[in-house]
Amino acid sequence: MSTEQAARWDLIRHRFHYEGIHDMSGTTDKIKGVANEAAGKAKQGAGEVVGSDKLKTEGAAQETKGDAQKAVGDAKNAVKDAANKAADAANKNL
């Protein structure tokens, strides 16, 4: 890796760590996703009990939202891990 590439990765790492880009971390997204999945499943169950198609539909939508949030969290964590590994490798080569 060139010195220029190493500097770019250091900047990316710096922005993630010091400039607040990581404020909504992958872990936070995953936690919110799990909460939305649970709430969605509860709504669907309540909709079944009371016979409300609207509540069942809202629950399914909320569960899908939770799935998407978890996927975003996984993606953020993967990008962060890749950036950290690249920056570490660049620093070892300097």
Image (cartoon, rainbow, N blue to C red):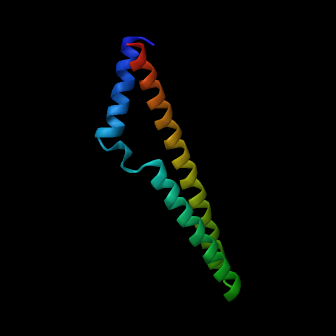
- Residue name at image x 53 percent, y 66 percent: 35
From the top left corner, tell me how far across and down residue 32 is, in percent.
49, 61
Viewport quadrant of the C terminus = top left
- Pick whichever, 55 or 24, lies toward us: 24
Describe residue 58's horizontal placement relative to residue 14 as left or right. right
Residue nearest the viewer, comparing 4 with 89: 89
Q: Quadrant of the N terminus?
A: top left
Counting labels gives: 0
Asked which quadrant contains residue 88, the reply is top left
Residue at position x 66%, y 76% in the image? 44
Residue farthest left in this picture:
19
**Residue at 33% across, 35% down:** 15
Which residue is outermost to the front?
A: 92
In-image side of 29 versus 57 (left or right): left
Residue 11 placement (x, y as % from top left): 33, 27
- Is 3 on the left-hand or right-hand side of 1? left
Asked if residue 26 is positioned above or below residue 55 in the image, the reply reads: above
Instruction: Report x, y in % for residue 77.
Output: 50, 42
Left/right of residue 41 with respect to residue 81 in the rendered view: right
In the image, residue 35 above or below residue 87:
below
User: Quarter-wise, where is residue 91 in the image?
Assistant: top left
Residue 20 pos. (x, y %): 31, 44
Q: For the view shown, which residue lies furthest in the bottom direction?
A: 50
Residue at 56% across, 53% down: 70
